[in-house]
Image (cartoon, grey):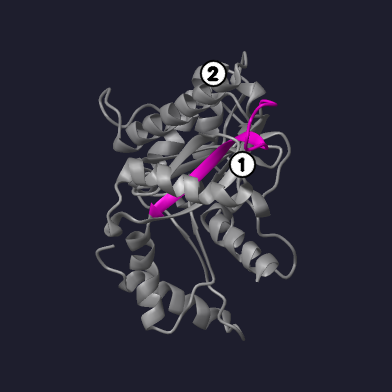
């Protein structure tokens, strides 16, 4: 991290505004150096799994002290061992997430200096399913300005995660172009009559309204926002196709039945509708905050706070 001051100031402001009697801080971090991969491990005692994973990571990333990586893992599937296996147990496929120790401490050291001690530090978006649970195959897509995270969960089991650098800032800067693109796409889908995209609907879905015929703002060219959205949908489709091939399924819908969007970019009107039209799977905006006692966020802004709400849920249940 080049400048840690904004992180410290943000945490201090949040604690001050919350007037919390106890300073419980839970952080969720995204960084380009975070690595997620699936490893297949032979039968071994449970206590040896982490050491074996650390050895594998040293082979991949180097064994210097500066390259030491913090890690966590979850068992994806198990396979019965051969009867003759001397170690017993079952072979395992594990989902491993790791990040250099120096990256994590670049975030938390400034907080320690301010006498703020985070009790949970998460990398990626693994907490989202905790406060936005859904059955079946669910794709959680967290849309940040610079980094996009995707997590595929099958009935509560983490199956696939992926992270990519995508410059989605143009979507935030030119939301009108996104809404216009959604309207044009809807018109192309339904022809001259029927239901078209209505950007005033908070869930970003297709709604019954008169046909809109707005044309491109430029002379035949695409805006930066449209190009960013095309790159995003292409990446999501590529990831879903990989999941389909790996499961040997006939269609993507066999792997995933819904998509949940979170993050600041998910609040842009039209993004959810365009992604749904492109991938062919129902897309909803993350809405983990509910109830009369909840904070009153502006309409349509809850996706931007979804990950923070997920970390708060972890804090309430684990601390």
Q: Which mark is residue 245?
A: 2
Query: Residue 121, image x and y in percent?
Result: 50, 63
- Apparent side of residue 309 relative to residue 134 in the rendered image (left or right): left
Q: List the single residue furthest toward the top.
A: 250
Q: Tell me whether circle 1 and circle 2 mark residues in contact (CB < 8 Å).
A: no
Q: Nearer the viewer, residue 187 or 4?
A: 4
Secondary structure under the numbered disc 1 in the rendered image: strand
Q: Residue at x 60, y 61 (%)?
A: 309
Q: Residues within 10 Å of mark 1 (few under 14, many from 20)?
A: some
- Apparent side of residue 143 relative to residue 82 in the rendered image (left or right): left
| Relative to 134, residue 220 above or below | above
Q: Nearer the viewer, residue 290 or 119?
A: 119
Secondary structure under the numbered disc 2 in the rendered image: helix
- Apparent side of residue 190 relative to residue 180 in the rendered image (left or right): right
Q: Residue at x 43, y 84 (%)?
A: 115
Q: Nearer the viewer, residue 183 or 52?
A: 52
| Relative to 14, residue 215 above or below | above
Query: Residue 83, image x and y in percent?
Result: 70, 26
Q: Residue at x 67, y 37 (%)?
A: 89
Q: Is residue 48 among the parts visible in the rendering?
A: yes
Does residue 11 show up magenta in the picture?
no
Q: Residues within 10 Å of mark 2 (few under 14, many from 20)?
A: few
First reached walking from the N terminus: tag 1 or tag 2: 1
- Apparent side of residue 314 relative to residue 238 in the rendered image (left or right): right
Quadrant in the picture for residue 180: top left
Residue at mark 1: 75
Quadrant in the picture for residue 104: bottom left
Give the position of the C terminus as an image quadrant: bottom right
Query: Residue 169, image x and y in percent?
Result: 34, 47
> What range is drawn magenta here?
82-99
Query: Residue 21, image x and y in percent?
Result: 62, 86
């Amino acid at each position: 991290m080049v400048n840690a001051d904004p992180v410290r100031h943000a945490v201090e402001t949040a604690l001050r505004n919350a007037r919390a009697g106890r300073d419980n801080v839970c952080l969720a971090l995204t960084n380009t150096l975070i690595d997620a991969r699936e490893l297949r491990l032979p039968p071994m005692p449970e206590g040896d799994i982490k050491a074996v994973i650390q050895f594998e990571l040293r082979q991949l990333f180097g064994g210097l002290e500066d390259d030491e990586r913090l890690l966590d893992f979850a068992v994806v599937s198990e396979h019965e061992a051969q009867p003759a296996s001397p170690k017993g147990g079952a072979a395992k496929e594990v989902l491993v997430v790791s990040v250099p120790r120096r990256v994590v401490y670049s975030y938390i050291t400034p907080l320690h200096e301010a006498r703020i001690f985070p009790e949970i530090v998460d990398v990626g978006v693994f907490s989202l399913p905790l406060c936005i649970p859904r059955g079946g195959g669910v794709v959680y897509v967290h849309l940040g300005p610079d980094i996009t995270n995707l997590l595929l969960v099958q009935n509560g089991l983490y199956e696939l995660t992926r992270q990519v650098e995508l410059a989605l800032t143009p979507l935030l800067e030119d939301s009108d172009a996104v809404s216009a693109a959604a309207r044009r796409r809807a018109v192309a889908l339904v022809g001259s009559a029927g239901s078209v995209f209505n950007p005033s609907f908070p869930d970003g879905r297709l709604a019954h309204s008169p046909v809109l015929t707005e044309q491109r703002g430029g002379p035949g060219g695409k805006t930066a926002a449209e190009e960013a959205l095309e790159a995003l949908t292409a990446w999501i489709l590529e990831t879903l196709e990989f999941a389909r091939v790996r499961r040997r399924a006939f269609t993507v819908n066999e792997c995933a039945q819904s998509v949940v969007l979170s993050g600041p970019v998910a609040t842009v009107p039209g993004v959810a509708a365009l992604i749904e039209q492109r991938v062919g799977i129902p897309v909803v905006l993350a809405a983990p905050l509910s109830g009369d006692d909840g904070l009153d966020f502006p309409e349509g802004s809850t996706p931007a706070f979804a990950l923070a709400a997920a970390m708060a849920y972890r804090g309430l249940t684990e601390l």
